[in-house]
Image (cartoon, grey):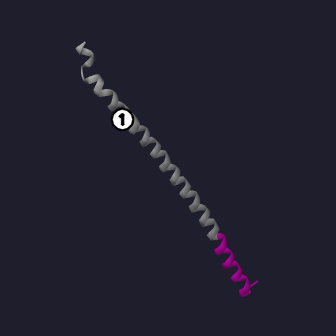
Amino acid sequence: MKSPRWGYVRIISGTIFGGIFGFYLMHRAELQYKEMWNERLKKYEEELKMKQSMETHTPTELSGDHLAR
């Protein structure tokens, strides 16, 4: 089968299937990237809450109010 028509069909079908496959791979990579950043954001928010809770409890303990009584 050395007809030019067969060559065109191969090129067009390869382009279409390659585009679909490439889109699928990039979509998966994007979802994984977003999930990674969401996990990092959750970790950051937890650390921030922990720092804020430590800051709110520390001044009352260090003020010496419990020693004045």
Is 26 part of what is drawn in magenta?
Answer: no
Task: Count the numbered circles shown.
Answer: 1
Q: Residues within 10 Å of mark 1 (few under 14, many from 20)?
A: few
Coordinates of residue 22 in the picture (x, y in percent): 60, 66
Asked where in the image residue 61 lies, by quadrant, the reply is: top left
Circle 1 is placed at which residue position? 52
Depth check, front residue: 7 or 64: 64
Q: Residue drawn at (43%, 38%), measured in percent from left and top?
A: 46
Depth check, front residue: 68 or 31: 68
Up/down of 63 relative to 25, above or below? above
Up/down of 34 relative to 46, above or below? below
Q: Residue drawn at (51%, 53%), measured in percent from left and top?
A: 34
Q: Residue drawn at (45%, 46%), measured in percent from left and top?
A: 41
Q: Tell me where the magenta segment starts and ends, as one range.
A: 1-17
Asked where in the image residue 69 lies, by quadrant, the reply is: top left
Left or right placement of residue 43 versus residue 25 in this view:
left
Residue at the farthest top position: 69
Left or right placement of residue 13 versus residue 27 in this view:
right
Q: Secondary structure at mark 1?
A: helix
Depth check, front residue: 18 or 1: 18
Tell me the chief SS of the magenta region. helix
Q: Residue drawn at (26%, 19%), measured in percent from left and top?
A: 65
